[in-house]
Amino acid sequence: MSSKSYYYLLVSLQFIFITILAINHGLYTPSTLALLTFLIGSAFGIYALKHNTLNNFNITPEIKQNAALITTGAYRYIRHPMYFSVLVMMLGVVVSKPTLLSLFIYVLLVVTLFLKAQKEEALWVEQSSEYQNYRLKTKRIIPFVL
C-alpha cells in the first residue's frame, strides 16, 4: 500500500469511527459528566488551533511543504493535541451511553489516532532535526502521561 493510500485509510477510519459513535448515540441526552468531558475536549481543541495556522494544519499525517514545528500552547505539552481533543470529545460521547459496541469503536479510534501520530512523527524526524529535541520534552498524546 502506498504512503498516500495509508494516510487516507487512517483518516477515513478516523471519520468512520467518529460517525459510528455519533450515530450510535444519536440525540441521547448526555449526563453532566459526558457533556463536561465533551466540552473539555472541544475547548482543548480550540486552544490547540489557536497556536497553529491553517497553512500548517493537515488532517492526514503528511507534513505540508514549508510546515513549521509548533511548540507553543498545547503543543508545549503534547505533540498531537488535536488527537487528544478528539479522543476526549469521543470519550464524552461514549460515556453518555456506554455499550460494548461504543467501547470497541472507541478503542479502534484510539488505535487509528496512535497510528496516525506514529506515521506523522516518523515524517517529522526525517524532515527536522529539532523534532528529536521536541520529542524528548513532550508526551505524544496525553499531557504529562503518554
Image (cartoon, grey):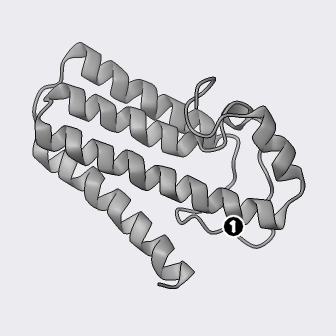
Which residue occupies the extreme right position in the image? 129
The image shows residue 94, relative to residue 86, as above or below, that is above
Is residue 116 left or right of 72 when viewed as pictured?
left
Is residue 17 left or right of 51 when viewed as pictured?
left
Residue 49 image offset from top left, x and y in percent: 61, 43
The image shows residue 57, relative to residue 27, as above or below, that is below
Is residue 89 left or right of 74 when viewed as pictured?
left
Residue 17 seen in render:
yes
Taking depth in this image into account, of 57 and 87 the one nearest to the observer is: 87
| Residue found 31% across the figure and 43% down from its top | 107
The image shows residue 22, relative to residue 7, as above or below, that is above
Q: How many labels sit on residues?
A: 1
Residue 117 image offset from top left, x and y in percent: 57, 53
Label 1 is placed on what type of residue?
Ile
| Residue found 50% across the figure and 71% down from its top | 7
- Near mark 1 (Cα within 10 A), the count class, few <14, some 14-19 or many ≥20, is some
Residue 140 image offset from top left, x and y in percent: 62, 40
Which residue occupies the extreme bottom position in the image? 2
Q: Quadrant of the C terminus?
A: top right
| Residue found 40% across the figure and 72% down from its top | 9
Determine whether the residue tagged by mark 1 lies in a helix, strand or loop. loop
Q: Quadrant of residue 63?
A: bottom right
Is residue 88 left or right of 30 when viewed as pictured?
right
Residue 133 image offset from top left, x and y in percent: 86, 43
The image shows residue 136, relative to residue 52, as above or below, that is above
Residue 55 seen in render:
no
> Which residue carries the number 1 mark?
63
